[in-house]
Image (cartoon, grey):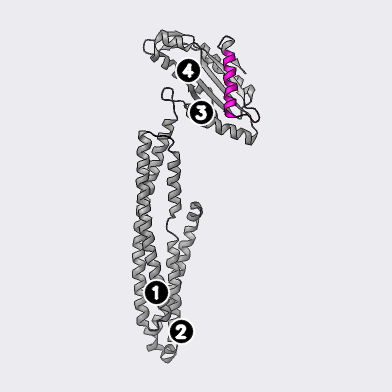
């Protein structure tokens, strides 16, 4: 059953169980009152109703058992917890110190939950057996004293099961909270593994996943999707002239310039080295070209300085290759066409856009 549907049905189950319980209590109490008190007031007429009263007690006890079974429907479903654990396990994409630690904690919590469910399953089995035996005995009982003993036994068993259920619920709530904490930690770890540490953009691994998804989406929805590959011109000279630390700072500044020009569904990643990639869902080739030219122009006119010494670096430019996804084209072919356009832009003199 869907967990959301179960949660919606809980108030109805509670209401039904309470209503049936009150009805069962009235069926049990009324005959006892008839047998103990009414005979003194009503005489033989009340005594003649003794057999009917005993039948009502049996009927009330059966309804009471039904109420107890309804209460068991309120217990949390184990598949829901296991599904949650499986979702967390699927997100652990590659080995890493944080991911491995989370995986160990997930395994520990899963073992704890399985042990709790096994224990409760055994308690439920014993409880069901007790109810079944009590139900058979109630049908055969005739005297009020026997019925009182049977009902007392049912109350005791119900109290035991209620305590067992409360303990299980408390433990499962604690495990649920731990799982939620692990989920949050795992999301952070996963995102960290998908980010470029230098520029804070998405990395190549994230780019590959996103492009594959967008290619599938574009095919299904029949909407245009474009890809821009950008490469910083003569970046080796920057490293040779100013050092790799300044080169890293230039890459961060370039990534900031690119990020400021995209919005909405657009996806920016560091493709590798001094190369960047932009995935533009639901974007025509014309609009993708406009964006590439806008970024190229902003890079060209920007004044670049070394932050610590405030020393001018000179002009930083980039070349761009733009491609729109074609019908039936694979992800790799799509990247290959954008890369070939980037190569054309570099051959044509750099600091330009090719499509």
Q: CA distance from mark 3 to mark 4?
A: 15 Å
Q: CA distance from mark 2 to mark 3?
A: 78 Å
Q: Label 2 crowding class (10 Å Cα cut-off): few <14, some 14-19, many 20+?
A: few
Q: CA distance from mark 3 to mark 1?
A: 65 Å
**Is residue 311 at all visible to an observer of this figure?**
no
Residue 14: where, in percent of width, then height? 45, 62
In the picture of the structure, the residue carrying the numbered disc 4 is 274
In the picture of the structure, the residue carrying the numbered disc 2 is 52
- The quadrant holding residue 354 is top right
In the picture of the structure, the residue carrying the numbered disc 3 is 207
Q: Label 3 crowding class (10 Å Cα cut-off): few <14, some 14-19, many 20+?
A: many
Q: How many marks?
A: 4
Q: CA distance from mark 4 to mark 2?
A: 92 Å
Q: Earlier in the sequence, mark 2 or mark 3?
A: 2
**Is residue 137 at all visible to an observer of this figure?**
yes
Q: Secondary structure at mark 1?
A: helix
Frontmost residue, 277 versus 180: 277
- Highlighted range, magenta: 325-345
Contact between marks 4 and 1 (CB within 8 A): the answer is no
- The quadrant holding residue 353 is top right
């Amino acid at each position: 059953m869907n967990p959301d549907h179960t949660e919606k049905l809980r108030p109805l189950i509670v209401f039904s169980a309470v209503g049936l319980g009150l009805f069962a209590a009235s069926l049990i109490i009324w005959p006892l009152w008839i047998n103990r008190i009414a005979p003194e007031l009503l005489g033989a007429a009340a005594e003649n109703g003794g057999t009917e009263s005993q039948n009502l007690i049996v009927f009330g006890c059966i309804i009471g058992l039904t109420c107890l079974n309804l209460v068991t429907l309120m217990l949390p479903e184990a598949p829901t917890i296991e599904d949650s654990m499986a979702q967390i396990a699927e997100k652990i994409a590659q080995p890493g110190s944080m991911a491995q630690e989370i995986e160990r904690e997930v395994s520990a919590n899963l073992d704890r939950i399985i042990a709790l469910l096994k224990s409760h399953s055994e308690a439920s089995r014993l409880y069901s057996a007790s109810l079944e035996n009590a139900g058979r005995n109630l049908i055969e009982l005739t005297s009020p004293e026997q019925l009182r003993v049977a009902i007392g036994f049912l109350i005791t068993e119900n109290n035991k099961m209620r305590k067992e259920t409360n303990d299980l619920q408390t433990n499962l709530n604690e495990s649920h909270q731990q799982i939620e904490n692990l989920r949050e930690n795992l999301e952070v770890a996963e995102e960290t593994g998908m980010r470029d540490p230098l520029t804070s953009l998405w990395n190549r691994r994230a780019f590959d996943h996103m492009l594959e998804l967008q290619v599938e989406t574009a095919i299904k929805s029949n909407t245009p999707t474009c890809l821009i590959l950008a490469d910083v011109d003569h970046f080796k000279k920057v490293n040779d002239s100013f050092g790799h630390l300044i080169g890293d700072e230039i890459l961060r500044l370039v990534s900031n310039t690119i990020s400021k020009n995209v919005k909405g569904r657009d996806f920016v990643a560091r493709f590798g080295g001094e190369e960047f990639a932009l995935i533009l869902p639901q974007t025509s080739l014309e609009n993708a070209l406009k964006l590439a030219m806008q970024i190229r122009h902003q890079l060209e006119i920007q004044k670049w300085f070394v932050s610590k010494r405030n020393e001018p670096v000179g002009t930083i430019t980039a070349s761009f290759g733009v491609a729109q996804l074609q019908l039936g084209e694979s992800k790799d072919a799509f990247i290959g066409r954008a890369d070939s356009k980037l190569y054309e832009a570099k051959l044509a003199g750099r600091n330009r856009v090719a499509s």
